[in-house]
Image (tube, helix red, strand yellow):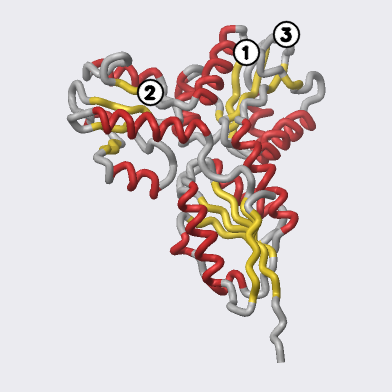
Amino acid sequence: MEQNIIKMEIKVAKHAGFCFGVKKAIEIAEEVAQNNKRDTYVYGQLVHNEKVIKDLENKGIIFIENINEIPQNAVTVLRAHGEPGTTYELLEQKSIVKGKNLNDATCPLVTLVHNVAIKLKNNGYEVILFGKANHPEAIGTSYHLKGKDTFIVEEPEHADNVIDYIKNNDFEKIAIISQTTMSVYGYKKLIDNVNSELKDAKFEEIPLSLKDLTKKYGYVDTICNPTKQRQSDTEELAKECDIVIIIGGKNSSNSKELYAKCKEFGVESYFIQSEEQLQKEWFIGKEKIGVTAGASTPDYLINEVVERIKDMANFKKEVLLNLKI
């Protein structure tokens, strides 16, 4: 008697893995190391992915967390997340400067947020940042505002703190901006939560072009498009699949947001760094399996996860692979 064939479908998000900013940062680091006869240093994690960092270390790149440990006049690469001006000042004291031996791999979309922050500040706005206080991007952006005194709100549920901050200070104009990798839904929810508590003026959107800076209360959508694309694709997977696997570095903010997005929709979800963490029992009885990955996850890790899931699939099942949602 023939056994029934159950079709298991693996759906990989269309926008998954490296974004252009991460690709560029890695290309810069690899090119610098290849052309450098001495040691090449990277300050901080170039990107938030342990596997990528290990691969780069195997190519002779040295990662340093303490800037004081970078030798004088060393060839240095700055990570994609952006740095405060103090980093450049400290490196200059070590004779490490742009145009000579300093290679800046800051993502241009992070630089855009810095420019937005500076222009808002210069136009009389008290700027509040929606982001993770200990994230290097948030630290870099804060430098351009009020340094350690920059008001950072991490969760939409913390809207009351924003309201208190506004009420306890006499700001003429206030603007909210976001770290590039935060939740699109979370940012909207934060604005809605704040507006629900305000009686007079409400926060209105200021275009990214910043052409209109007359609003008393405004917010700028500074979440980058690669983040939006990955969150949108992940939402579709969460709606369609029985289980979603999210691949990303432990410290990757945008990968964590993809995991949170799946949890919002109540779909069974697992956040992993590599295929070794997959467990066969996760896929028992599952017919539609979604796979997505953060912007700092290389394609080869995604492919390894997909192949491992196929290997784990019961031999009675026919596995279909859908590479685009």
Looking at the image, residue 208 sits to the left or right of residue 100; the answer is right
Give the numbered dot on residue 104: 2
Pointer 3 residue:
214
Pointer 1 residue:
125
- Quadrant of the image for the N terminus? bottom right
State the SS at label 1: strand
Q: Quadrant of residue 172?
A: top right
Measured Cα–Cα span from mark 2 to mark 3: 34 Å
Local crowd size for mark 1, using a 10 Å CA cut-off: few (<14), some (14–19), many (≥20) = many
Query: Foreground mark, 2 or 3?
Result: 2
Callout 1 amino acid: Tyr
Q: Please tell me which of labels 2 and 3 falls first in the chain.
A: 2
Residue 153, given in percent of the width and then of the height, sits at: 59, 33
Say if 281 sits above or below 45 in the image. below
Measured Cα–Cα span from mark 2 to mark 1: 29 Å
Q: Nearer the viewer, residue 73 or 20?
A: 20
